[in-house]
Amino acid sequence: MRSWTRTTIPYYLAVAPFFVLFTVFGIFPLVVAGYLSLHRWDGLSPMRYVGFDQFSRLADDPQFWHALLTTLEIFAMSQVPLAIAALVGAFLLSNARLRFRGLYQTIYFLPQVTSIVVIAIVFQSLFGSNFGVINRLLEWLHLPSVAWMTSQWGMNTVVALMIIWRGFGYLVLFFMAGMAAIPPELYEAAEIDGARPARQLWSITLPMLRPTIVFAMLTGIVGGLQVFTEPQVLIGSLGTDVPGVTLMLLQYDYIGRNPAVGAQPDLGYASAIGWAVFIVVALASALSWTVSRRTSDKEAN
């Protein structure tokens, strides 16, 4: 027993800080959110137990379903093109004989470390309905202008483009790190056999990069379905009925940030929305993981 204690306890102590932080900032908030979702509470007056009424209200709330549809649309418009573009960009940077490759990597990564507020100002100046550069260009080409910031499709497109702009450089470096582990002899043999870059990407890079792609896909699902910052800095405090309101932004409105926007403060309902987001993310992640495992098993067989 003493020998087991001397050899095992130090390892548990070494990893204990992670589990302590995970319990305090991960499990405990989840439990509190579950408790709050069973109550109606504005943060000041006494709590009132309502059972599962908050979840019934969630199912009958058109704002919730509208926010869910908006979140899924932005996710599809941003994460899929982002992953494809970053994968192709990383492949070209890794295999092409380019000068100043480090400079290109730095330029691609700059949006990731740029203030989101600055990026929002730039996109507002580009896609503004009245004085935006894009609409001015469309008018110059004698094409009809687009209500980018006031229509559902337009706002979703702008938010998706912001996400792609910010995340492209990060995913490029992420995929390049995975491609660096692929033996270069495979590409040399493919070139000798006459395989073009597109064939090399499909037959060598994608199969060898599968673990990296799966990890990027799972993190993209978690982040893409919880998108908040981009629509928040674009929309501000205009309310829950404007285009571009995602699930996280709807939850933020019900926390009580600004009751004038049309959402009365209700931390219980906000917690119910948070649990709905958690369920959507968990189901999407499980589905993605299952599909990737089945595809991998089929290729292995």
Image (spheres, grey):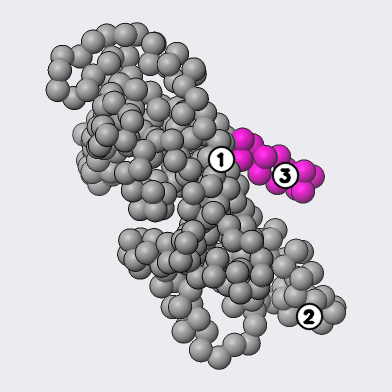
Count of residue discs: 3
The quadrant holding residue 139 is: bottom right
Residues 191 and 173: in front is 173
Residues 180 and 242: in front is 242
Amino acid under label 2?
Glu
- Residue at mark 1 to residue at mark 2: CA–CA distance: 41 Å
- Residue at mark 1 to residue at mark 3: CA–CA distance: 24 Å
- Identify the residue at image location x=46%, y=66%: 131
- Identify the residue at image location x=76%, y=64%: 203
Q: Viewer-nearest of labels 1 and 3?
A: 1
Amino acid under label 1?
Leu
Give percent across and percent down for residue 71.
51, 40
Disc 1 target residue = 72
Q: Earlier in the sequence, mark 1 or mark 2?
A: 1
- Identify the residue at image location x=54%, y=70%: 136
The reply to whether residue 187 is visible in this rendering is yes
- Identify the residue at image location x=49%, y=17%: 60
Query: Tag 1: Cα neighbours inside 10 Å, few (<14), some, or many (≥20)?
Result: some
Amino acid under label 3?
Thr
The quadrant holding residue 207 is: bottom right
The reply to whether residue 8 is visible in this rendering is no
Give percent across and percent down for residue 247.
44, 36
Location of the C terminus (image quadrant): top right
The label on residue 191 is: 2
Disc 3 target residue = 295
Q: Is residue 144 above or below residue 12?
A: below
Q: Is residue 260 above or below residue 206?
A: above
Residues 189 and 88: in front is 88
- Residue at mark 2 to residue at mark 3: CA–CA distance: 27 Å
The label on residue 103 is: none
Magenta-highlighted residues = 287-301
Location of the N terminus (image quadrant): top left
